[in-house]
Image (cartoon, grey):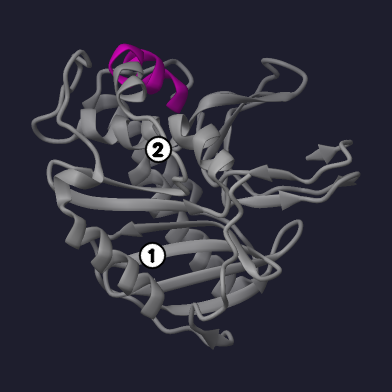
Amino acid sequence: MVNDCDERVLLLDGEELIGAKQNRVLNLTILVGSKSTIVIPVSCVEAGRWSHATPEFRPSKSSFYAAGRAMKTEHVSSSLRSHGSRHSNQGAVWDSIAEKAVRMAAASPTSAMSEIFTRHETGLADYVKAFAAAPGQVGAAFSINGKLIGMDLFDCTATLAKLLPKLVRSYALDAIDAPGGAGADSSAAGGIGPAAAGKGAVEDLLQRIAAATVEEFKAVGEGQDLRFRAAGLTGAALADGDRIVHLCAFQLQNHSTQEGHSPITHFSRPSARRTH
């Protein structure tokens, strides 16, 4: 990532980069300093291509679907604790995409995740139109068929407003894929949104995040990389000074957790939310 701007640039966990020799997704959220060049950790989401489609990457309007983001977040946290690196389990990422492509009738010659989003573009666009950021909103929680799946929180209303369509597409693809969803016909799907799970479920998730075990690492780029875990919960946050720039949290199907040996703390620092 080459940032020639005078301003810092925020790259979102799970954002898809299309082009070069294979499509990739970002392994975590990164704050790139002004006038700087860094190597960013990514996972491949196109197993069957290793030839240049374009000389460079370009961001797509999609990001890794929510179930994939949850899996990847857990992988990266484990990699940090064990090896100090930010690697995902690449084989598991490819397997997840391949299985989803079969279920959603979206196979492609290069096993590209982007083909799944393309195949269901009509349904995804309907979801994006249905969800808009409210004034002052800095985060969003998502549920599918009444079950709370995860949430993303930001320190700035403008950031949430800009990135909400990508987040909606991420969760909406899983909603279409869910039992009772649209499957191969994406014209109709089960609803997503925090209201379906209830306000209490969202408050409970926030309390679990606040009480979770937190491990702190130097971030890629600027700030601090915080990784947190609790029974049935995984997540990460990027801190910059006295605020949390971005936090993502996901419910896990597998509720087992392992304690690492990194310095442990809890979310106790104040978070100054900017409104512009």
Label 2 CA crowd tier, 10 Å (few <14, some 14–19, many 20+): few
Span shown in magenta: 112-124
- Disc tally is 2
Q: Secondary structure at mark 2?
A: loop
Residue placed most toward the observer, 79 or 230:
230
Badge 1 crowding class, 10 Å Cα cut-off, few under 14, some 14 to 19, many 20 or more, is: many
- Residue shown at 71%/69% (left/top)? 241
Residue to which mark 2 is pinned: 134
In this rendering, the answer to whether 123 lies above or below 248 is: above
Q: Specify the amino acid type for callout 1.
A: Thr
How far from the left and from the top, in percent, is residue 181? 14, 28
Viewer-side residue, 87 vs 70: 70
Seen in the picture, residue 265 relative to 199 is either above or below; the reply is: below
Identify the residue shown where x is 25% and y is 23%: 104
Return the x and y of residue 87 as percentages of the image width and height. Answer: 58, 56
Looking at the picture, tell me which residue is in the foreground, 235 or 142. Answer: 142
For the residues labelled 2 and 1, the Cα–Cα distance comes to: 27 Å
